[in-house]
Image (cartoon, grey):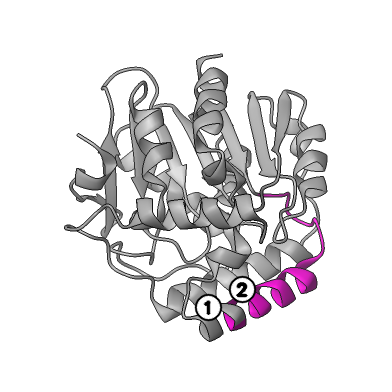
Amino acid sequence: MKWKDVPNQTVDVDGVSFTYRALGPEGDVPVVLLHHLMAVLDDWDPRVIDGLAAHRRVIAFDNRGVGGTGGSVPNDVEDMGRDAIAFIHALGLKQVDLLGFSLGGGVAQMVLLQEPGLVRRAILAGTGPRGGGGIEEITKVAVTAYAKAALTFSDARNFLFFPRTPAGKHAAKDYFARLDERTSGKDKSISLQARRAQLKAIRAAGMSQPDDLSVISQPVFVANGDHDIMVASSHSIGMAKRMPNAHFKIYPDSGHGGVFQHHEEFVKDALQHLAG
């Protein structure tokens, strides 16, 4: 089975129905995925999921208030982290690996800080630390991208995830073609409440006091593109240097979606990291 065919499942989390999909062989420690701003299950790159699931059990879910999951999205990443932990416990999992992309990387950091014993290894992609600053610039970049998308009748991720180079434009085209592979059993779209709450959470995180990342002792792989206009590569590198057991990789000629543009290399790097 491939990601495009995986059925939606639900699990009760303290009276709220959480939607998720699971793919890959049973056994070992599963990899739980945490997604980006305004994303639902259908926004995960199938090549990344299928690549990981060829060797590992992969579980992707809609956190509280996102897509098919009930409830309302909280206004801060700390509560998003608590919800992710509650979901993992609801599945009866004792330990997991985490892959957090963008906002999901911020949520993954909360899980690592709030319940470190739950996480064996982590991958933080296209993300930075809380209190990293530059939140005003991120807002300007996002507004500009959505304006360009409206004028060109296209998806804003063309401008936010990929550089406007020949290689970047080609990667964007391929990425959206892969997202269209799923034709049935699609997730619910993101709600207006979820969009607003996630934006508030990102702004609050950017203006927060920095977390003490030195207490994160798990092996962490930090990945980003070299021209990320949403989360500067320097933020990702600086975050990795604040963790005692982290290493980083910057993918060339790519942006915020560098792990999707270089999906084959990223999957190989991710599996190597998760295998220790």
**Residue 146 % position (x, y):** 58, 78
Q: Is residue 67 above or below residue 150?
A: above
Residue 260 in view, yes or no: yes
Identify the secondary structure beneath mark 1: helix
Residue under the point 39% across and 39% down = 47
Residue 62 in view, yes or no: no
Question: As rendered, which of 209 and 259 lies closer to the eye?
Answer: 259
Q: Is residue 6 left or right of residue 114?
A: left
Numbered disc total:
2
Query: In the image, which residues are magenta?
Result: 127-147
Question: As rendered, which of 18 and 182 lies closer to the eye?
Answer: 182
Dot 1: within a 10 Å radius of its alpha carbon, few (fewer than 14), some, or many (20 or more) residues? some
**Residue 240 % position (x, y):** 76, 35
Residue under the point 81% across and 65% down = 134
Identify the mark at residue 171; answer none if there is no mark. none
Question: As rendered, which of 193 and 222 lies closer to the eye?
Answer: 222
Q: What is the quadrant of the C terminus in the image?
A: top right
**Residue 249 % position (x, y):** 71, 32
Residue under the point 40% across and 22% down = 29
Dot 2: within a 10 Å radius of its alpha carbon, few (fewer than 14), some, or many (20 or more) residues? some
- Tag 2 near tag 1, CB within 8 Å: yes
Task: Give the amino acid at mark 2.
Answer: Lys
Q: Is residue 18 magenta?
A: no
Identify the mark at residue 200; answer none if there is no mark. 2
